[in-house]
Image (tube, rainbow, N blue to C red):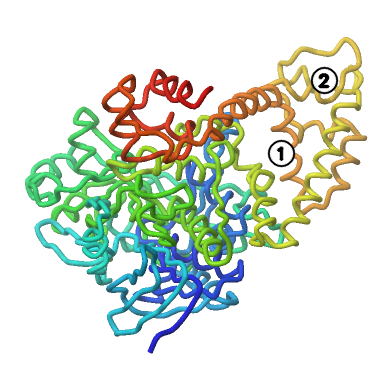
Amino acid sequence: MIFKYDVIVIGGGHAGCEAACAAARLGSRTLLITMNMNTLGQMSCNPAVGGIAKGQIVREIDALGGQMGIITDKTAIQFRMLNRSKGPAMWSPRSQSDRARFVLEWIDTVTHTPNLFVWQDAVTEILFANNAVVGAKTALGAEFRAKSVALTAGTFLNGLMHFGQKQIAGGRISETASFGVTEQLKSMGFVAGRMKTGTPCRIDGKTIDFNRTTEQVGDNDFHKFSFLPTVKRELPQHSCFITYTNEKTHDILRRDLQKSPLYNGQIKSVGPRYCPSIETKIVTFADKTSHQLFLEPEGVNSNEFYLNGFSSSLPVETQIEAINTIAGLEQAKLFRPGYAIEYDFFDTTQLKHNLETKMVDNLFFAGQINGTTGYEEAAGQGIIAGINAHLRCHSDGEFTLARSEAYIGVLIDDLVTKGVDEPYRMFSSRAEYRLLLRQDDADRRLTQKSYNLGLSTKERFDLLMKKTDIEKELTEFLVNHSVKPHEINFYLQNKNSSELRRSCKISEILVRPQICLVDLIDIIPALKEKIYNIHASRRDEIVESVEIKLKYDGYIKREKLIADKLQRLEHIYIKDKIDYNAIRSLSTEARQKLTRINPDTIGQASRISGISPSDISVLLVLMGR
């Protein structure tokens, strides 16, 4: 029997769940096929969401009407705003989650989303007709037809786990791998490769001596991931704990290095440079006598701890021996060891910016099969793939984000124009407009776009409009209201800031680096009255946002001007218009890469690795610019 849908999403991880929810909420009759519906949104690695640049992606997903931020807040057991000592472009939210509740929230969200249906099975074949995808077949013999398909299989495509010399086929521990799809796509001409990632052991908390570690508590303030005031962090908060490896630890690891699949030739694929295994750390940083580790709690009622920083594929007995040399872990017992996993990924230069494949119509790739690493990067791709899979069913339109609009835009543009030769992880340094892409303004950048699509709700849009009005009113007050020297000089003196000799606008004082708007509330009665008229649920968020915009106004405007100028190159379309091999004034590398990638615009061409400014000048001349 054949079952019909508008959109099929293959894989129930972070990319797949976001893709399926987005397509269904937009109105497409959507089917999510997963091998285990009891592990939807599973945190395969650490029980945390967010971090440097990743936290901005989660806030963008929320601003677009996605689910990751909401589910993270509901399951948070520790929240921290990282990089508060730096400027606001670098502030990044990060949350520890209750790992079990995170999955339960995803199951509840997916199974209660209208238009979204779930089938538990393994996809063995994707169906095609007339150079377009038309459905999928499963191991149970079921056949599903759809107008669009999103492949979000994570690490499951030919997944192979390594525990020392022991190899087990699987997508993650205790879960089987998926076979057949990679081979089918390669036979059609898709280019695939192998990548590697890994995860540390899990430790029994009752065997940890926390007195020999350093406690790391979370923040207790208003910050969270979701912009919805009704979503709160309500679970009991838990601490993380810091400890360190030592020379004895390293001696044990070096002694058995030849038993590591990373160094004995057993693993041949490329691993993540920015999240190295403990074996890689002691080799790459041979002069370091210790490495910092974090013991992260896995849940409110769980006694399971994740040893962040100790990813390993060494034999189990070596892991245990080395861990027992670490302060606080001398008597530690493991729930399960760390392991490495190899899996298939696809060359991302085979994708368009809407994550549709160039080779086959209506087929979308998202998540780790695109060579990325991290829940957040996967979910960001997932929501874009889900939106565009829906659009392909009902129109010829597409939804993309520019590099100046979102970290998600930076991520996808990097994948499509540069490809990947190692697992891709998002960093703030990858975004040239990071002052425009702050975590506090994701709703202003993206919610109206999503509302126009029909994904963000009217409730969310109205909240944005109300917030914008309040921010404008407060900003005008700060720009126009004066404060007298006798009202504020004592405060300025305490802050080692120059005292006033005449009345001054509040905004002029606020731009001083030592001055904080929260401090001025109790000093200036009119300001206090103005701010306390804002509803308490949004007051702190709005005060912080207004302060950031006033303090950094000149820098923000300058960056926006640069972005607008460079954006013009994105409107000079060159796809299928130029025979690059015939242009001898282009470098050989430029001719080869431009022919292979066939960029849409001059802007995209300028970001391809190996394309020089002189090559771009040649293209501009050819296009009459």
Residue lying at the far top in this picture: please name it: 501
Determine which residue is flagged by label 2.
490
Q: Amino acid at mark 2?
A: Phe
Determine which residue is flagged by label 1.
544
Residue lying at the far bottom in this picture: please name it: 1
Can residue 221 be seen by looking at this rendering? no
Asked where in the image residue 461 lies, by quadrant, the reply is bottom right
For this view, does 7 lie left or right of residue 608?
A: right
User: Gap in Å between the C-alphas at discs 1 and 2?
Assistant: 23 Å
The percent position of residue 324, horizontal first and vertical second, equals: 22, 52
The percent position of residue 76, horizontal first and vertical second, equals: 54, 59
For this view, does 132 lie left or right of residue 564?
A: left
Q: Is residue 79 above or below residue 3?
A: above
Q: Residue at x 49, y 32 (%)?
A: 603
Q: Is residue 13 above or below residue 595?
A: below
Q: Amino acid at mark 1?
A: Glu
Q: Helix, strand or loop at disc 1?
A: helix
For this view, does 354 lie left or right of residue 165?
A: right
Q: Helix, strand or loop at disc 2?
A: helix
Q: Residue at x 65, y 44 (%)?
A: 445
Between 228 and 133, the residue placed more toward the observer is 133
Q: Is residue 50 above or below residue 602?
A: below
Give the quarter of the figure containing the N terminus. bottom left
Mark 1 is surrounded, within 10 Å at the Cα level, by few (under 14), some (14 to 19) or many (20 or more) other residues, namely some
Please tell me which of labels 1 and 2 falls first in the chain.
Answer: 2
The percent position of residue 508, horizontal first and vertical second, equals: 80, 20
Q: Residue at x 40, y 71 (%)?
A: 134
